[in-house]
Image (cartoon, helix red, strand yellow):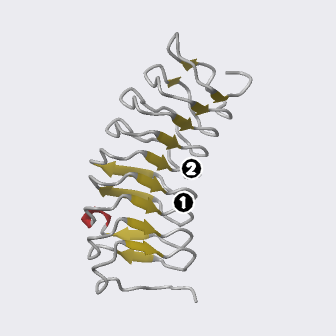
Amino acid sequence: NAIEKIDLSHNIQLDSLQLQGNYLFEIDVSTNKKLLLLDLLANDLQSVYGLSDLPHLTHLNLSFNLLDSLSFESKSIEVILATHNQLKYFDAKNARDLKNLNLTTNALSFLNVTPLASLETLLLSDNQIETINLERNAELNHLYMSSNFLTSLDVSRNLDLIGLKVDRNPSLTCIQVNDNQVIPTLSISEYQ
């Protein structure tokens, strides 16, 4: 049976919570301080409370929900999946260990990844992003930004980049790369 509402206040020892494919509208995980993994894939979530209260959380999956904003503070988070939502705003404060960020198919027009120096994979296809600053993301090896509104893109400081997908960005005619930079997997449109 699908769950519509859940009280987690008595389950304080949980280190993993997986509630995929339910009808949860909101959830409060603030008392679940031991959580390492939180998977809330495919619910009806519009609000998730208490993410900043989880000092050990490393993996978060909020994909296929109804979230329009996601903001929390975490020093431990490594993977965030929040695809197929309605996100217009995203901020993971102090996420110095964040390696994988997938926000594909949302409504983001801006995203600040400058403080996320450990990012290795950044997937932002199918959004509304016009510009992005990747200067401080030296660890980046996969960048997927197809189907956005990019007007410029500079990946010249992302020397570890092995996968770049930026096709279907009608105003992106030039991509700035380093003279000696080789990107093995590249997906661009014919006008780029």
Q: Please tell me whether residue 6 is drawn above or below residue 169 in the rendered image.
A: below
Secondary element under disc 1, as helix, strand or loop, is: loop
Residue under the point 39% across and 39% down: 113
107 lies left or right of 74: right
Quarter of the image with the N terminus is bottom right
Give neighbour class at mark 2: few <14, some 14-19, many 20+ (Cα, 10 Å).
many
Distance (Cα) linking label 1 and label 2: 9 Å
Of circles 1 and 2, the one toward us is 2
- The quadrant holding residue 99 is top left
Amino acid type of the residue tagged 1 in the rendering: Asn
Who comes first in sequence, dot 1 or dot 2?
Answer: 1
Give the x, y percent position of residue 78. 38, 51
Q: Which residue is mark 2?
A: 104
Give the x, y percent position of residue 180. 52, 11
Residue under the point 31% across and 48% down: 95
Most distant residue in the top direction: 179
Residue under the point 36% across and 39% down: 118
116 lies left or right of 131: left
Circle on res. 14: none
Q: Which residue is mark 1?
A: 85
Secondary element under disc 2, as helix, strand or loop, is: loop
Q: Please tell me whether residue 119 is drawn above or below residue 77 in the rendered image.
A: above
162 lies left or right of 33: right
Q: Please tell me whether residue 10 is drawn above or below residue 150 in the rendered image.
A: below
- The quadrant holding residue 48 is bottom left
Give the x, y percent position of residue 146. 63, 38
Q: Nearer the viewer, residue 113 or 86?
A: 113
Residue under the point 29% across and 75% down: 32
Quarter of the image with the C terminus is top right
Amino acid type of the residue tagged 2 in the rendering: Thr
